[in-house]
Image (cartoon, rainbow, N blue to C red):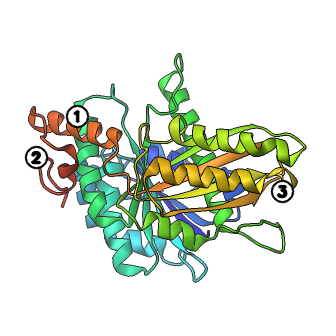
Amino acid sequence: MKVALIGVGQAGGKLAEALSRDPLAADSVVSSLAINSARADLSSIGLDTLLVGAERVNGHGVGGDNDLGATVMRDDTNEVIDAVSGRVGSDCEAIIITAGLGGGTGSGGAPVLAHELKRVYDVPVYVLGVLPGRDEGALYQRNAGRSLKTLAREADATILVDNDAWRQAGESMDEGYAAVNEKIAQRVGLLLAAGEFDPANVAAESVVDSSEIINTLREGSLAAIGYASAESSPDADANLNTITSVVRNALLTGTSLPDATTAESGLLIVAGRADRINRKGVESAQTWLEDELGSMQVRGGDYPLDSERLAGLVLLGGVERSERVQAFLDQASEASVAEETPDATESLVNDDLDDLF
């Protein structure tokens, strides 16, 4: 799946850089750009960059103020669209905005950018958004709640990553963020590569193409991605249970949004050496996934990959009512008004979390 990649804010820029470096994503990312209001953060990013908000904040960032983050992106819309122009060519099938949803520039700027890009381009605009961890403070929770509510309206879909999902005990904050970025890049890279299927180079029995990714994400405003892998046997018959096991782990313990086991739609990709992928295993795993999600809209296929391991990747569309989303929106609402929302999922429509615009 060919995509243009735009990182917004410090976390978004670093995530865009990690994804652009991923070997599997190399043929899918047709262009990349990092946008920020802090000049110092852009200087460490190995991508083309654009500074926004220079007249208001003089390159010093917005200090965690996502209202100001939205304002500087809106003020510099023409410059941003000019910078993006030419990066979204006729071969581009989607635009992916990467952003940390807890800070200022990313959480405020990403919804504005999604709105403007959808106005200009006729390809889907997705956001790959990182939720702050539970210990990152009330400001970050409130920012992310407001950003997420606005993104649910403005983006075609937002793939959520819980910052707590893949961080390891004992890691420093920088180490933890870098590790999370690499894990996101690995998963999204495989997703994009599978959607970029080329029958001249690889032979799959059941093809996953970009339209299936788009149709899966179309089923809801929020999405999640899961992944797990295991050593494979040279004998494909012996890998039937291995495939079932990695798909179960991808959903139950390996998702970017823990406890997201209810969804409107799903996409399953089994990757590994073609001669080791057991077709009955793929079909069995797909049936299990349908039952677990409570959805008949589960697409599936395989992606031949030169690896001794078998991997299962699960894309979930429409996870608005997952336990983690409800818990996060409760926490964000509490940070905003110091009272609990009766039904957290209503936060996406109408509650005490204000829209950014």
Q: How many residues crowd mark 3 within 10 Å: few (<14), some (14–19), many (20+)?
A: some
Q: Earlier in the sequence, mark 2 or mark 1?
A: 1
Rounded to the nearest whole Å, what is the CA distance between mark 3 and mark 1? 45 Å
Report the residue marked by disc 2.
352
Say whether residue 52 is left or right of residue 12: left
Which residue bears the numbered disc 3?
274
Q: Which mark is residue 304?
A: none
**Nearer the N terminus, badge 2 or badge 3?**
3
User: Local crowd at mark 1 within 10 Å, few (<14), some, or many (≥20)?
Assistant: many
Q: How many marks?
A: 3
Alpha carbons under labels 2 and 1: distance apart: 12 Å
The answer to whether residue 61 is above or below residue 203 is: above
* Res. 135 in view: yes
Camera-side residue: 352 or 62? 352
Which residue is denoted by mark 1 in the rendering?
331
Q: CA distance from mark 2 to mark 3?
A: 51 Å
Which residue type carries mark 3? Answer: Ala
Q: Is residue 9 above or below residue 132?
A: below
Label 1 amino acid?
Gln
Q: Quadrant of residue 231?
A: top right
Q: Secondary structure at mark 1?
A: helix
Q: Position of residue 64 (x, y in %)?
A: 28, 41
Quarter of the image that includes the N terminus: bottom right
Say which quadrant the C terminus sits in: bottom left
As rendered, which of 80 and 119 lies closer to the eye?
Answer: 119
Q: Give the secondary structure at mark 3.
A: helix
Residue 75, picture quadrant: bottom left
Are dots 3 and 1 in contact, CB under 8 Å?
Answer: no
**Amino acid found under the numbered disc labelled 2:** Asp
Side (left or right) of 200 relative to 77: right
